[in-house]
Image (spheres, grey):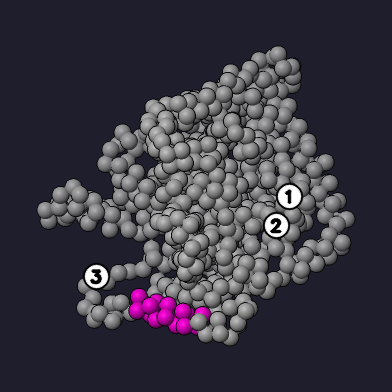
Amino acid sequence: MNNISRHLQLTQFAALLVVFFILCFAIDPSENNILWRLPAFLAAVPEMLNSSVEYAMFEWMPIQTYNPEIEDYEDSALLIEVTRSISRAVLFGIELIREILVGGQKTIVAFTSWDFVSENEWAVWPALPWTVVAGVAIILGYALSGRWLAILVGCATTYIAVFGQWEPAMETLSFVLVAAPASVLLGVFLAILAFKFRVFESALMPLLNVAQTMPHFSYLVPVTVFFGVGDHAGAIATIIFATPPMIRLTLLGLKGVSPEVLEAGMMNGCNKLQLMFKVLIPTARHDILVGVSQVIMQCLAMAVIASFIGAKGLGFNLLLALNQLRIGQALELGICIVLIAVVLDKLSLGWANKQIDYFADLSFSQRNKYPLMMAAILVLGVLLASIGSLIFKNEINYFYLIPHNQGITTENFWQSGVDWMVENWYASLQAFNKGLIINLLVPMKNAYLSMPVAATFVLVMGIGYIVGGLRSALVVGGLLLFIASTEWWDRALITAYMATFGVLVSVVIGTVTGSLCAQNSFATRAILLLCDTFQTFPSFIYLIPVIMLFGVTDTSVLIAVVIYATIPAIRYTVEGLSNVPQSLQDAGTMSGVSRIQRWLQIEMPLAFPHIMLGINQTVVFALFMVIIGAMIGTDDLGQLVLKSLSDKHGIGNGLMLGLCVAFIGLAVDQILRTWAHQRKQALGLA
């Protein structure tokens, strides 16, 4: 029966392709032909959104507010006062943490005035010596995961300090230390509401699907309108971006609590509040802390992107270095960002995996040995900084703070390496670049642009119907209709072409690499560790080496897409093949099949549903990187999203463009998830 169904689906796919190509050749490419391109029915929506936002910001619900500059009351819209208050609170938190780490005066000014600070030279918040911060981080790493994490933390913090990037690194860290807790608290709160109220969950899930497929830049456009630009705006955009995974993982953890645990809590007399905070949340602790780890990674992924709207730190400096084509400096900054990402990821995972002994009978010093060690580090660090001020009189106190760009640098080394590669590899790289563009990318791009809208609808909805029935066909058709009804259909096709190329290459590389590594336990552990490491890299980092080698071309973007999107393809392939029961593999071997036959006929079919979820993630990763690739020159939707950032009336275009990208991802997600679920059911795994 399964074979008949499979052959029927293949026949349907073949017939669908025939109809698609007939329509492609039969439909006249004329702008007046509705079968070629739909009219832009939604062209007026961006302007309507702009007008609505402008009214809400400046006219809706006026209230009386006191203006100290004119010493009188004036009318102001309620929304703008609310957003200003949120901005001030977020900015105060960032500056407070930043000045604890690197010193300053703004926190003191917040409670006094600039006149007070200028009249009192002592009114300066002293920075924590870098040795103190590094020492505390090392002890924290040792407490959470042992000496290897402590060594990693020590090497990372020393590198950042010695290379003169301590101040921008602490600026980035202060940004993360405000955005991450806010995202965690908001995510847990919304997850609890979704867990308690199914109606709220049903309304929240589609919003999370859209939010997690929206490109990074799309979050920046509305934030700049409502909150302005600066560190606070970057933090708010990051909070919005990082909250969805926290909601999902917290909700997953709460739903995973066994009924027996709930019953035990109720039998012990817990009320609803106690049941939530003393039973459910502690039991779901592991999933929630994994969510915290994901939030931290998302915050660092936005660290570079947020620099587009004024967020300070390593991301801002990296952006400047790339704009000036200072590849050596960009590499140093990129390494710093990666080190912070890896350290925070390992610390958060160590926290998630650490087992707590609630019944241990320990003395005060045993219970608090790590806080006591941190206090000792503080005293020693301050003492060392004081000694340094005597040793390095009128010079840089290397025991206190190493000023920005005053440490050692390898920029000239890397730049000379780039120059050598350009000098020696230029001809071959340009030949590869030119051959790829002329022989593959341009024909593929033209093929996508020559697709009539009617033929595209037939193909996509047909695939949706064959895979998931009428419901899937209508869902993907509705998503496609939204994109086709905007004025950016051709740009969406270019985005789809770039994502398709990246996904196809990534899936091939990922499946082959994952399959080879899954054959050996050591190779499996090694490749998963490599995937973990690469997945902590902020996506912008992948653009540095490709710009260095291929310049500003579509090839650079697509190679970055392939590198970035291959990670989930490898991971899910390895995990899927590793989860195939050993008994089935042994049964196949005993039946006389070769290793290739066992892989093709036993392992791959059983791992297929898991691999499909990896391909789904590959599509999302590819779309994200294609949009980020607009930074180095593309003519897809990403270029228009980037352009809307510099337009004061760009919120309408920015949101609509973001939805177009999200709907491309959601259409593919609908088809792949449905297909994976069907395969699970067929294999008896669902």
- Is the residue under label 2 in contact with that under label 3 (CB below 8 Å)? no
Q: Amino acid at mark 3?
A: Tyr
Q: Quadrant of the C terminus?
A: top left
| Between 513 and 28, the one nearer to me in the picture | 28
Q: Residue 431, percent across and down?
A: 86, 51
Mark sitting earlier along the chain (3/2)? 2
User: From this viewpoint, is residue 440 visible?
Assistant: yes
Q: Secondary structure at mark 2?
A: helix
Q: Which mark is residue 321?
A: 2
Q: Amino acid at mark 2?
A: Ala
Magenta stretch: give its range: 371-385
Q: Residue at x 45, y 26 (%)?
A: 59
Reply yes or no: does residue 374 show up in magenta: yes
Task: From the image, give the main secondary structure of the stretch colored magenta.
Answer: helix
Q: Which mark is residue 556?
A: 1
Q: Residue 287, percent across and down?
A: 37, 56
Q: Cα distance, mark 1 to mark 2?
A: 18 Å
Q: Which residue is mark 3?
A: 358
Q: Is residue 325 left or right of residue 385?
A: right
Neighbours of disc 1 within 10 Å: few (<14), some (14-19), many (20+): many
